Image (cartoon, rainbow, N blue to C red):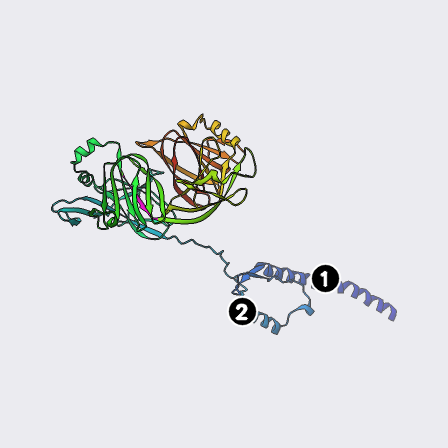
């Protein structure tokens, strides 16, 4: 009997106990599922600021394991929360995301004013300067426009009588306003300074010539005018084109007799076109190539710099070659433009040194290289590496651009430092604006009519004597503005 009762009790326990266990297990996993939803709602990775450059991340997701031995005590949990508050970590909201640092380039500007010199009129409200019976009206124009000569569709108005330009961006174009002739400016704009540009009225030009305005205009139809602003280092100047009159002006724009007292030299009715300005100073003789625009005033600021020496490496690029090759030329075949007595000093196979030369400040330096049958000139600014075409590449360029002879054409090759995004260029001869053909040499060795990211060299082809004003902008929005020259029988390489 006792044995039978024990057997029945064991049977009941085996039936009832699993139900209770299963019920407990069911309730447990239901609770686990609820907790896991709460944990998943919290942010997995949350940044916080420790006042250092690196961001530190902490994983806040907990492993949802229901184990009584693994439960953190209330006191320990309080300590953790306190430490998290000290570290500025929020359980509800992550710290603000650190923004990337942006380095902004602050731009520095120079300010330019436009001064108009005209013949004194009775009752004039303009400021006047007089020497004896001769008076000059000096007007600081409050309203004028700047028109870049490489893009005549762009008109930049002055603000409150000043034109502000970013330092380092060459000022190349015409100022237009008031009763004065337009004045063409070619200034390097290398410093944050305050300067003015001077022009003349037709009445003032006629007065210099001792004629009436109408008579002066009838006699001279293919001329312009030139104003040179002098530095103390300049002892004498001259030009190689015909002109009618030359006047010296002091710092108050009065006519003076002696060059020693002159702040400006004015050449009126100069034959339009490229003019070679000879400059004599304390460093010796140098020359500047300027351009006289038809019925305009050309303004040049003459500052001289003496270069004791500078070095260049000359390489040649062959057809489809991947790397340039060294050029091994005798030193007497390389010399500074208009310094024929100062030929280069050879330092190695491709390295040459130019010594004791004087240049007008802000102008490009040019070298003549006796290398091909035609005259080869190379223009550079700060670059120490020059790349000229090999004879085979030179022939291919002439063939592809349709130039049968440089006797009737000019070719300008521009070696790009970086891919070009935008190119603007205008050509000017003695009497008018001239069309120029443009070709592009890509890295695959093909010459095309379209500019692309593969373009390594740009070619300008013209059939006139004059200048080409150029603006080149790369994909970093760095802009290079300069004036180059178109001259028959010259192959010109501009190293950018």
Residue position for label 1:
22
Q: Nearer the viewer, mark 1 or mark 2?
A: 2
Q: Is residue 66 left or right of residue 244?
A: right
Disc with the residue nearer the chain's start (1 vs 2): 1
Residue 343, numbered label: none
Residue depicted at 24% across the width and 31% down the height: 221
Q: Which residues are magenta?
A: 297-303
Q: Is residue 223 left or right of residue 119?
A: right
Pick out the residue farthest to the bottom.
75
The answer to whether residue 411 shows anywhere in this view is no
Pick out the residue farthest to the left.
122
Answer whether residue 390 is magenta in the image: no
The N terminus: image quadrant: bottom right
Residue depicted at 46% across the width and 28% down the height: 401
Residue position for label 2:
85
| Residue 234 position in % (x across, y down) | 31, 48
């Amino acid at each position: 009997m006792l044995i039978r009762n024990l057997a029945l009790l064991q049977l009941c326990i085996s039936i009832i106990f699993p139900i209770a266990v299963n019920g407990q297990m069911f309730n447990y996993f239901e609770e686990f599922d609820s907790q896991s939803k709460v944990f998943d709602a919290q942010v997995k990775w949350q940044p916080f600021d420790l006042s250092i450059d690196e961001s530190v991340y902490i994983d806040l997701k907990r492993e949802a394991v229901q184990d009584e031995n693994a439960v953190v005590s209330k006191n320990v949990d309080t300590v953790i929360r306190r430490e998290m508050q000290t570290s500025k970590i929020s359980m509800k909201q992550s710290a603000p995301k650190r923004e990337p640092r942006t380095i902004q380039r602050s731009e520095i500007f120079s300010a330019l004013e436009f001064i108009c010199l005209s013949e004194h009129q009775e009752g004039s409200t303009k400021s006047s300067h007089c020497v004896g019976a001769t008076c000059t009206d000096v007007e600081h124009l409050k309203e004028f426009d700047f028109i870049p000569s490489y893009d005549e569709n762009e008109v930049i108005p002055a603000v409150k009588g000043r034109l502000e330009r970013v330092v380092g961006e060459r000022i190349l174009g015409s100022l237009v306003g008031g009763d004065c002739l337009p004045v063409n400016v070619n200034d390097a704009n290398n410093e944050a300074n305050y300067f003015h540009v001077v022009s003349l009225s037709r009445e003032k030009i006629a007065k210099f010539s001792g004629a009436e305005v109408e008579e002066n205009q009838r006699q001279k139809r293919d001329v312009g005018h030139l104003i040179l602003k002098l530095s103390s280092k300049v002892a004498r100047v001259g030009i190689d084109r015909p002109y009618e009159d030359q006047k010296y002006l002091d710092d108050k724009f009065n006519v003076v007799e002696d060059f020693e007292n002159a702040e400006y030299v004015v050449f009126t009715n100069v034959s339009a076109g490229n003019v070679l300005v000879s400059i004599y100073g304390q460093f010796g003789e140098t020359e500047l190539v300027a351009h006289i625009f038809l019925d305009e005033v050309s303004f040049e600021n003459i500052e001289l710099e003496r270069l004791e020496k500078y070095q260049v490496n000359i390489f040649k690029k062959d057809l489809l070659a991947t790397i340039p090759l060294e050029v091994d030329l005798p030193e007497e075949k390389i010399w500074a433009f208009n310094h024929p007595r100062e030929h280069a000093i050879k330092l190695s196979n491709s390295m040459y040194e130019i010594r004791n030369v004087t240049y007008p400040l802000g102008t490009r330096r040019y070298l003549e290289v006796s290398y091909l049958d035609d005259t080869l000139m190379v223009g550079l600014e700060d670059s120490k590496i020059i790349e000229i075409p090999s004879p085979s590449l030179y022939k291919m360029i002439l063939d592809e651009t349709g130039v049968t002879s440089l006797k009737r054409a000019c070719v300008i090759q521009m070696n790009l430092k970086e891919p070009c995004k935008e190119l603007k260029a205008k050509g000017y001869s003695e009497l008018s604006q001239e069309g120029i053909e443009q070709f592009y040499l890509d890295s695959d060795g093909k010459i095309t009519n379209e500019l692309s990211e593969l373009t390594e060299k740009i070619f300008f082809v013209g059939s006139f004597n004059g200048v080409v004003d150029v603006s080149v902008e790369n994909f970093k929005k760095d802009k290079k503005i300069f004036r180059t020259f178109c001259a028959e029988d010259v192959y010109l390489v501009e190293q950018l």
